[in-house]
Image: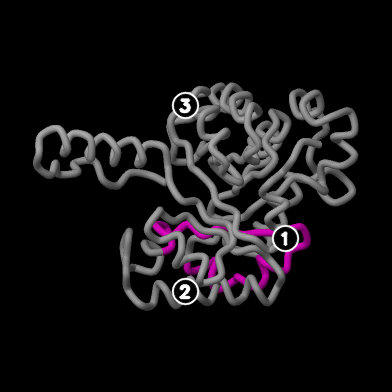
Amino acid sequence: MRPNPLRDAFANSTPALGCWLSVPSSVTAEVAGKIGFDYVCIDMQHGLIDYSDVVPMLQGLSNGDSTATVRVPWNEPGIIGKVLDAGAMAVIVPMVNTGDEAEAAISRGMYAPRGARSSGPVRAQPLEGPDYAEVANDHVSIIPMVETVEAVENIDAILSTDGVQAIYVGPMDLGVSMGLGRGTTDPSFFDALDHIAERCKAHGVVAGIHAAPDTTADRIERGYNMVTMHAELAAMRLTLIDTLSLGRGSVVEDQGAGGGY
């Protein structure tokens, strides 16, 4: 198997820092994968990326050392299996709200006897080696998303599911589910984040979260050891705004804030 910085960070209890991709581009994936992030996530849920885009993006990531990660559109066996067969080494599964749903996600990403993943690693085996099918369960990470009030209420059942090494908080959806809206700074929202991190620590599970450059340090301090720092579209937009502001000699208003994550 090739190096897997995300799993190494999990094993060493050190923060894993990641980048998010939502535009279908193998070149962008290749560049992001060589910067030094522990993982780079290709977003099939809210991004503009289809499976036909995922394969060349995974090929681009293979030129770097970042763990190739995919957020699938849903907790569904077909797409989880396909991105793993294409070479993803970590899969983030959205909207996992119960222990049973966490078990389903793990089962769909693991070979028997632990799970029910169908065997056919068409790209993963040539990439990772002839013993891929025998060792994949020990190297692949299936990461349920905790992003609703229901999931927080069932956090212990999710975290106690065999095979859950990490969970990933979707802060926008969590804020909406709590009735607080996107980008909330309500104290109850941060109480929820702290509660999730505390329960993760109690279960020996890595707490992951979607963040931003200016919130990464805070999330790590709260106990999150898998933190997505930036997304390629946001980074491009902010850099172009700064560049245009410099050229015009005045601040250019950001007209494109928001979007998916």
Callout 2 amino acid: Ala
Label 1 vs 2, first from the N-terminus: 1
Give above or below for 15 relative to 76: below
Closer to us: mark 1 or mark 2? 1
For label 2, the SS is helix
For label 3, the SS is loop
Residue drawn where x is 42% and y is 73% of the image: 190
Q: Is residue 151 magenta?
A: yes
Callout 1 amino acid: Asn
* Spatial separation of the CA atoms under disc 1 and disc 2: 26 Å
Q: Residues within 10 Å of mark 1 (few under 14, many from 20)?
A: few
Give above or below for 191 relative to 246: below
Q: Nearer the viewer, residue 142 or 236?
A: 236
* Residue identifier under label 2: 192
- Left/right placement of residue 215 relative to residue 242 reads right
For label 1, the SS is helix
Label 2 vs 3, first from the N-terminus: 3
In which image quadrant can residue 76 be found?
top right
- Left/right placement of residue 117 relative to residue 75 reads right
Image: magenta residue range: 149-174
* Residue identifier under label 3: 24
Q: Residues within 10 Å of mark 2 (few under 14, many from 20)?
A: some
The answer to whether residue 72 shows anywhere in this view is: no
Give coordinates of residue 193: x percent, y percent. 48, 71
In which image quadrant can residue 129 be found?
top right
